[in-house]
Image (spheres, rainbow, N blue to C red):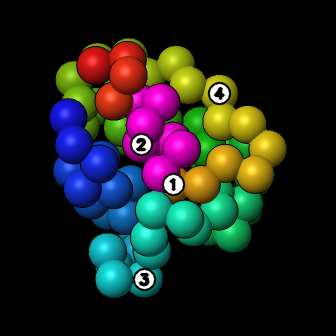
């Protein structure tokens, strides 16, 4: 799956317009807490129809998350 598709899913799940976020956007800038991160992972799992078990590291960007997810698929 390509980065653009994953980015679209992330933006939709978090309620952002795709123009507001980019590959280098830090997760900590747009996700406020652990609950929101868990909700995002559940949304991604549902949208991609597979279990997503990625634990984002400190200072991860949306691009890092998308890359990790694409490696699982």
Callout 1 touching callout 2 (CB < 8 Å): yes
| Separation of residues labelled 4 and 2 (CA atoms) | 12 Å
Horizontal arrangement in the rendering, residue 50 relative to residue 28 (left or right): left
Disc 3 on helix, strand or loop?
loop
Residue that label 2 marks: 66
Label 2 packing within 10 angstroms: few (<14), some (14-19), many (20+): many
How many numbered marks, from 0 up?
Answer: 4
| Separation of residues labelled 3 and 2 (CA atoms) | 16 Å
For image coordinates 79% across by 44% down, the residue present is 58
The label on residue 50 is none
Up-down: is 11 above or below 58? below
Residue that label 3 marks: 20
Residue 57 on image: x %, y %: 73, 37
Horizontal arrangement in the rendering, residue 27 relative to residue 17 (left or right): right
Can residue 42 be seen here? no
Callout 4 touching callout 2 (CB < 8 Å): no
Residue that label 4 marks: 55
For image coordinates 42% across by 82% down, the residue present is 20
Residue 12 on image: x %, y %: 32, 62
Label 3 packing within 10 angstroms: few (<14), some (14-19), many (20+): few
Callout 1 touching callout 3 (CB < 8 Å): no
**Overall secondary structure of the magenta stretch?**
helix
| Separation of residues labelled 1 and 2 (CA atoms) | 6 Å
The label on residue 62 is 1
| Separation of residues labelled 1 and 3 (CA atoms) | 12 Å
Quarter in which the C terminus is drawn: top left
Nearer the observer: mark 4 or 2; the answer is 2
Q: In which quarter of the image is residue 34?
A: top right
Which residue occupies the foreground of this view, 16 or 18?
18
Disc 2 on helix, strand or loop?
helix
Which residue occupies the foreground of this view, 5 or 12?
5
**The magenta stretch spans which residues?**
63-69
């Amino acid at each position: 799956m390509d980065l653009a598709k994953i980015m679209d899913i992330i933006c939709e799940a978090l309620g952002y317009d795709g123009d507001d976020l980019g590959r280098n956007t830090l997760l900590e800038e747009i996700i406020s807490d652990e609950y929101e991160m868990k909700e995002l992972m559940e949304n991604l799992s549902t949208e991609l129809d597979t279990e997503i078990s990625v634990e984002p590291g400190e200072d991860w960007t949306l691009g890092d998350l998308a890359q990790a997810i694409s490696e699982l698929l």
